[in-house]
Amino acid sequence: MSFANGYPARRFTPERGAFGKLLARDSIVRRLDWPLLGAAVALSLIGTALVFSATRNRTELTHGDQYYFLMRHLMNTGIGIGLATATIALGHRRLRGAVPVLYGISVVLVLAVLTPVGSTVNGAHAWIVLGGGFSLQPSEFTKLTIILSMAMVLSARVDAGDRIHPDHRTVAQALGFAVLPMAIVMLMPDLGSVMVMAVVVLGVLLASGASNRWVLGLIAAGTAGAVLVWQLGVLDQYQIDRFAAFANPALDPAGVGYNTNQARIAIGSGGLLGKGLFHGSQTTGQFVPEQQTDFVFTVAGEELGFVGALVIIGLLGVVLWRACRIARNATDLYGTIIAAGIIAWFAFQAFENIGMTLGIMPVAGLPLPFVSYGGSSMFAVWIGVGLLQAVRMQRPMSA
Amino acid sequence: MSNIPETGRTPRITIRLVILQMIVLSLLLTLGGRLWYLQIRNGQEYTQQAASNNVQEVVTPAVRGSILDDKGVPLADNETRLVVSASRTDLLKQKDDGKAVLTRLADVLGMSAQDVRNKVRLCDSKTPKPCWNGSPYQSIPITDKATTQQALQIMERREDFPGITAEPTAVRRYASPGGANAAQVLGYLSPVTDDEIAAAAKKGQSLLRSDSVGRSGLEKTYDSELRGKAGVTRYNVDNLGRVIGKAGETKAQAGSTLITSIDAKVQAVAEKELAQAIKDARKTWDKVTNSYYKADSGAVVVMDVHTGQVVAMASEPTYDNNAWVGGISAKDYKQLTTKSSNYPLLNRAIQGQSAPGSTFKVISTSAAVNAGYSIDGHYACPSSMTIGGRLFKNFEGESAGAITLEHALEISCDTVFYGLSYDQWLKDGGMKPKKHTNDWFYKTAKQFGLGSTTGIDLPGEVTGRIPDRQWKQAYYDANKTYWCEVAKSNKKDYASQIARENCTDGYVMRAGDSVNYAIGQGDTLVTPIQMARVYSAIANGGTLYQPSIGKAIVSADGKTVTKIQPQVSGKAPDTKKTLKYINQALAGVVTSGTAAWRFGGWPQDKITLHAKTGTAEVAGKQTTSWFTTYSKDYAVIMTISQGGTGSGGSGPAVRKIYEAMYGVQKDGSIDNKKALLPHPATTLPKINGDGTVKAPKAQNAQKASYDMPFLPAGSGGTVQLAALTPDRSEKYLFGRRYWS
């Protein structure tokens, strides 16, 4: 593509073709964070294989179609990527105007879950069944709208140049945006999502530059609140059992304890290289409940072994590392906060999910981003990826 | 660097973002570390757990080998019954813990719902019987006598009966061919206990939860041969126990067949005659106690004198082994183990011991000859003798002048043996025994194998007792304290006097002890099997065989036949000449001696019988009837506790056994066609190519129908019974009770 004299040919080309445009130095394609995208796609594809392995023999779930979950997971991934593309195309700044609307919709949806429209799946009243095999878990999207709304509120005056850091009133307002949906989700009760949201709020506040007093105060309040909830018996017994059984499976041997134990056996028996995809006895024998969704990591642990499981953690690491880069390089506080919120969300949810299968975190109904089967989660995390990319797009080229 | 960089952010945010990044990194590292801990460090342990998680073992019980008689007739074999069983695991998976299913099942089986529910509950200390005391993971049998129709109803409506199976299962059957029940010889089975599984594992053997093991008789002795090896199929299962693959299989190996020396026909006769003799004795008036004879128990042994193999062995009271099949009911168990039933599980032929009475005199005769008394010499047979200040009388007070030992044996003259034994006692030092006493009478008894087990292939054999000096000393040591306690009192009654004597020198063999001993009274105890061996040795020229019942073990496929060779365990301490004399004398008992009145018309010239009668006294009880006999080939020994005199109580029964074996008719003629066993079976029955053993036809195997009993909780199937010993410790408290 160059002349004999060494000058790049295109230098003198005034108009570029479509393909050329795509590869141009300032083009969307060139500005995308490819490692982030690649890791997210890889996780989704690995997820497809794991979900397939976990479900191909579960006739009671697949209704005879072995590939049901495989196809659905691929489809979800595709839709997710589509949503991410749309998000990128829109750009996070243009999205800002729509944030109040999106926020409103998400609050209405989580509220709807509390009405007879909502359904209970696996002990969590967190779903809206749409029919035709589709269902929606609004709390997944609420994580996004909390990030967006808080970012909007917190960054408004800083990005306008009025202030260096958000003032107390702004922080209080932003918290108000978070607390409303969190309270509703708490009532479902979907404790896992509330935990994620709380961590997201912390991440957002951290990145917003809100004073240390807010950050530390919130941590203290959260701790105090947890102790209070525990002491006042607000929680149902099953929630307490679920919480404690990760450390002592005997507390709830037929329920969470069984899950924890079987998950640990599955992962532990994988050894260094695993038993091979589709060859895990724990997976084939369906000993781990919810293996295609919340406990999908056990399939990796058993069938792909230590190496395979590390690859998944590594890919999550790539996603988070690139996200951190994006957060640091963002040109405005709005983008920084969005990126940080997504980091907190992905990081904590992944840690909680993998941690519970490894028996170091309490069992909570949270999917592993990209990997677990589940449309709402898949769409939400891919929108997250789209947001991260959009934030990256708007940084100066030098970075 | 300006305070507000290009990105327009403050250092505060930059630092915080770095912190966030560090937190993220540390979270991921935590996961990696934990992953390493689970998969690499503890991977082995979890691999094992995963393996046990998904492998379910299904046990196919091995068919237990049959026990056959000498002609191949099954004494114990298996029949196929339709067993309906329930899987507790499956029942508990149902919403109502299977209550509805069990109720439906009860309907089909025609049982009460409560009964069915009780059978599947697990035994514990609070649960009354019936209950299941096996593994909760094993199928629990509810009935083993389901009809085909009931089984079909259950199997065709699988959806109505989840967890219930109806399968044809091999169940032990004690066939009692021709009425030969041989209960105590065959023994019985009961489910294995946890302790036994553990004990077997220590020895490197494996017992399965579902196994039954032999608890007594041949079933116990030959348990490992008969049991075979259960097959185990290992299935990979999923979380609901659904089979998803086969992990391995070991085929069940059927147990070997045991061919015994028992002849079912002779056994049937022996059992019948023993029972009849007991019945008759109970109608006989005992002038001494002024009551009918109680005839509480008895035993008979028919032995092949050339090999020591047992042709028939019966013990009364008896029981039906089939009561144990599938687990014994609490009621039956209680019945078999209480005093009122007089412990029918005991095999009196090897576990019943009593004083032998005059049947012991063959030993005394041998002892006298060995001590140097001439067998042709003449010895005084007065009606009574005074020894050690006490009067010792002949049984019926008769006197016969000076007679030979042979004649003394024939007419059972006690005083001759008193005299000889007393003489020996004196020679050994009397009340001040020499350092090295000869003790011919005791030595000879031991040489004949008395005082120790014969080693017969049946469990639980007792030793009997020869009350020699050592025993006296041991007995004294054990009772000294008590005697001396009683001696302190100034009471002048007989008991106190004896206690006083015993306290001072109870360890010394007294004249009275020796004298009593010589005629088989006093503290001597023998078992019928011991006496069968003694008389067999006299019959066969002096060889003491280890009695046996097992003759050969045939592998299930019939390819390996392991013969069990008769073992010689000793030699009678008699010269040929002595034996010849004893033989003559014992033949004389039949023709002109104490048993002659029972053998009128016997074709003695064709089938020479030898016999000795014995009437042993037991303190506080009626006399024990002993009748020890032999022909050229067989020894027949019968004893009946509290059954009267030797010939009186047991004579007719023993004669009838001989008649049946030899085909002797009422008129004394011999019908060889009717003879059940004119010669001992020397060959094994024919073993077919497929491992089955050819049995003669015309054996009307008795099919019985049994209630489906259950083993009582906690019994573990083991019946613990002390060997049957007369209550001598009380009655013979003073170690000396002279026969007067």
Image: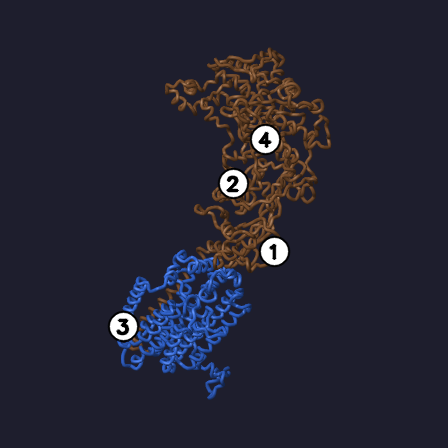
B213 lies left or right of A352:
right
Residue B279 shows which numbered tag?
4
Check the residue under mark 3 and report the chain it is in. A
Q: CA distance from mark 4 to mark 2?
A: 25 Å
Secondary element at tag 4:
helix
Near mark 3 (Cα within 10 A), the count class, few <14, some 14-19 or many ≥20, is some
- For label 3, the residue is A211
Which is closer to the viewer, label 2 or label 3?
Answer: 2
Amino acid type at circle 3 is: Ser
Amino acid type at circle 4 is: Lys
Q: Quadrant of residue B495?
A: top left
Query: Picture coordinates of residue B602 (x, y %)?
Result: 69, 24
- For label 2, the residue is B333
Query: Picture coordinates of residue A74 (x, y %)?
Result: 50, 72
Q: CA distance from mark 3 to mark 1?
A: 80 Å
- For label 1, the residue is B152
Q: Nearer the viewer, residue B401 or A278?
A: B401
Q: CA distance from mark 2 to mark 1?
A: 33 Å
A272 lies left or right of B676:
left
Query: Picture coordinates of residue A168 (x, y %)?
Result: 26, 75
A357 lies left or right of B616:
left
Q: CA distance from mark 2 to mark 3?
A: 85 Å
Chain A, hue in figure:
blue
Chain B, hue in figure:
brown
Amino acid type at circle 2 is: Tyr
Near mark 1 (Cα within 10 A), the count class, few <14, some 14-19 or many ≥20, is some
Which quadrant, please, contains the C terminus of chain A?
bottom left
First-in-chain label (4 vs 2): 4
Secondary element at tag 1:
helix
